[in-house]
Image (spheres, helix red, strand yellow):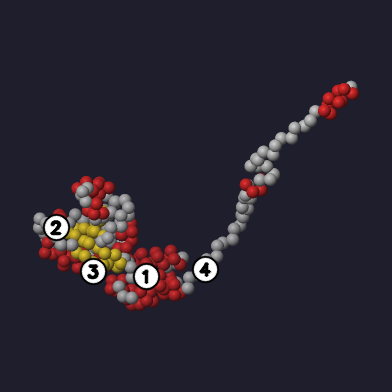
Amino acid sequence: MPACQNNIHSISVVKQPNIFHPLSHHNHAALIRPRPRYDPHPQPLTVMPASPERIASLQSKIWSGSLPLEIRLAASDCRTYTDSDPYLIQYPRLSYLAFLLPRLHAFFAPWLINPDVPAHEAWLSFEEVPLKWHYPAGLLYDLYSGAEPVNIDRRLEKEEASASSHADVEGAGGSGSIPWRLTIHYTDFPDGQLIPLDVEEKTMRDTFTNAMKEADFVRNGTARTAMSLSKQDSNSLWQAVQSRPSHSSTSTHLSGSS
């Protein structure tokens, strides 16, 4: 027994070297970050209101925004074998293309197959897609002038026809091309996609009024301000939309909605 005890005591314990381990007690706190606490009742973010001066400046910039247009007569309505001259204009983004129809008719009358066609029967398209006249011009541009062409087949045809010229491809109406190239038509009205206009612009005005009421409701939860406009204020507002005066003189009609 004593011999056995001596043998037991003679066994030495070999200490393992201090091997680095990512989850050892020396490194655990440094590598594992505490998880953020879940708050079942988070506090709403505090948004500092913009100053009236900044709001007025932003509204003025939006109101005065514009974009260049290049409008050509559709080949099916042109009486000459060559293209007609383009109609070029720097047009307000917040205005409507329907307001251009009388001027476009007067400009393209020498090239029209039927020059007696009424101006309000015209319609505009981009890459063979009819443009809804009750949308502002700036909104139409933002919707249809993106990176992808609206009419894929039409764009591919143009790219194949002008493969030798990169500039021609960009000018075919691609990503954000300036000026925005549109086509005006006086025949084959797309009844299923556009609402016909009338010579007195009643349809245009009614559509604008309804859109204004909807916008007032979305912004304020009620359309009371738009509904309570007097007949004189309504007429003044519509004239302002057509004539494009300064933003300050137009915004006074709806100042109660803010």
Identify the amino acid type marked 2: Asp
**Circle nearer the viewer, 2 or 3:** 2
Q: What mark, if any, has residue 48 been given in the picture?
A: 4
Q: CA distance from mark 3 to mark 4?
A: 46 Å
Identify the amino acid type marked 1: Lys
3 shown above or below 208: above
- Marks 3 and 1, the one that precedes in the sequence: 1
Identify the amino acid type marked 3: Glu
Q: CA distance from mark 3 to mark 1?
A: 31 Å
138 shown above or below 230: above
Residue ID at (14%, 60%) = 84
Please provide percent x and percent y for residue 61.
37, 70
Q: What mark, if any, has residue 83 been given in the picture?
A: 2
Please provide percent x and percent y for residue 22.
63, 42
**Circle nearer the viewer, 3 or 4:** 4
Dot 1, crowdedness within 10 Å: few (<14), some or many (≥20)? few
Dot 4, crowdedness within 10 Å: few (<14), some or many (≥20)? few
Instruction: Give whichever of 116, 146 is nearer the camera.
Output: 146
Dot 2, crowdedness within 10 Å: few (<14), some or many (≥20)? few
**Circle nearer the viewer, 3 or 1:** 1
Q: What mark, if any, has residue 61 been given in the picture?
A: 1
Residue at mark 3: 200
Res 206 quadrant in image: bottom left
Identify the amino acid type marked 4: Met
Instruction: Give whichever of 19, 156 is nearer the camera.
Output: 19
